[in-house]
Image: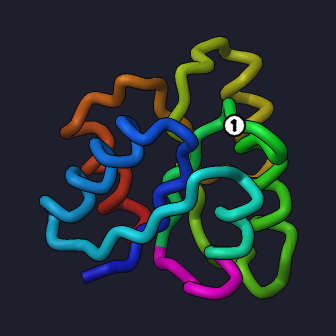
Amino acid sequence: MAKILVVDDSPTQLKNLTKLVEGQGHEALTAEDGMAGVSAAKEQQPDLILMDVVMPELNGFQATRKITQDPDTSHIPVIIVTTKDQQTDQVWGKRQGASDYIVKPPDEKDLIDKINAYL
């Protein structure tokens, strides 16, 4: 069982992704914004992070960059899960250190396959 941190400011998305993660037998940790996500990554040391992009304060791109550039958390794979579906967004997400990028609403099997690939 892996610890997976879900970072999303939408309560509905947080609930849906948490249910998906727990349905696969993993422990779900949650954070409601980018800043909380960065803190939780440092404190909880999850095995994987599912990161939204459009959030107040610190967006998902900024949070991903902070997590992947910090020596304490740089080993944690980050999968961006967002409504931002442009090719430039995907390229930018990877440049910030994201391991992968999925557009919402995610195909459940695709997301599960990607999660398993990084665990």
In the image, is 104 to the left or to the right of 45? Answer: left
Q: In this view, does 65 lie above or below 74?
A: above
In the image, is 100 to the left or to the right of 72? Answer: left
Residue underneath mark 1: 55
In the image, is 34 to the left or to the right of 57? Answer: left
Q: Where is residue 115 in the image (x, y as percent from the top left)?
A: 36, 57
Q: Is residue 77 magenta?
A: no
At 79% from the left and 32% from the top, the residue drawn is 92
Q: Callout 1: few (<14), some (14-19), or many (20+) C-alpha neighbours within 10 Å?
A: some
Residue type marked 1: Met
Colour scheme of the picture: rainbow
Q: In which quarter of the image is the N terminus?
A: bottom left
Question: Farthest top residue?
Answer: 86
Q: Position of residue 14 (x, y in %)?
A: 40, 47
In the image, is 5 to the left or to the right of 62? Answer: left
At 76% from the left and 18% from the top, the residue drawn is 88
Q: Can residue 95 be seen in this view?
A: no
At 20% from the left and 64% from the top, the residue drawn is 22
**Range shown magenta:** 41-47
59 or 32: which is nearer to us?
A: 32
SS for dot 1:
loop
